[in-house]
Image (cartoon, grey):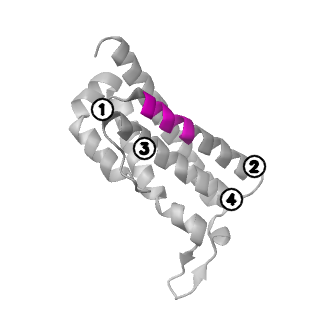
Amino acid sequence: MRNFTEVSRWQRDAQACLISAQRALTSEDYRVAVQNAQLCVELSAKGVIAYFAEPLWRHDPSAQLRSILIAQVDVSAKRGGQDLLQALYQLAADAEEVAPWHGWSTYGRESGTGTWIAAVDLCTREVAEDLLIRARRGLQALSDFLTVVTGSAEQGE
């Protein structure tokens, strides 16, 4: 596929979500911070995927990203080195970890005793801070990936 325009589009949306998440954390709106941080991770993973294939419309793109990384491991390692490859696998792990928060931060979650916990009660400062760490890390992985692949394209790869 090699679609730099699509990768860049996903990157811009992920960046906007990160900014929104950071603002929401500052204003102590943890539910909104969690929602946007989760989206940042999801969009960052889909940005990497978009270089190789059409991203599937799921909130957890981890399986598709891992599949692409396995298929492209030689290319990825040659272009970006092991650090980038490790960062992309971490992005897949983070995407899988944060995916449930897409629904939980909107609808809440069953407590296990038949009652529901409100989204606003699930989304604590600690959860928001954890997801923001993952969001920053994911967006950085996407940005590093885009830098590597655009540099490789300029060099004729």
Helix, strand or loop under label 3: helix
The crowding category of the residue bearing disc 1, from other C-alpha atoms within 10 Å (few below 14, some 14 to 19, many at least 20), is few
Q: Distance between the Cα atoms at labels 1 and 3?
A: 16 Å
Residue 45 marker: 3
The amino acid beneath tag 3 is Ala
Name the residue beneath numbered marker 2: 26
Q: Residue 83: x percent and y percent? A: 38, 31
Q: Quadrant of residue 136?
A: top right
Q: Is residue 145 above or below residue 49?
A: above
Helix, strand or loop under label 4: helix
Q: Say which quadrant the N terminus sits in.
A: top left
Q: Distance between the Cα atoms at labels 3 and 2?
A: 25 Å
Q: Distance between the Cα atoms at labels 4 and 3?
A: 23 Å
The crowding category of the residue bearing disc 4, from other C-alpha atoms within 10 Å (few below 14, some 14 to 19, many at least 20), is many
Residue 125 in view in this figure: no
Q: Earlier in the sequence, mark 1 or mark 4?
A: 1
Q: Quadrant of residue 111?
A: bottom right
Q: Is residue 132 above or below residue 156?
A: below
**Does the segment drawn in magenta span residue 17?**
no
Q: Could you tell me if the residues under marks 1 and 2 are in contact, i.e. CB atoms within 8 Å?
A: no
Residue 82 in view in this figure: yes
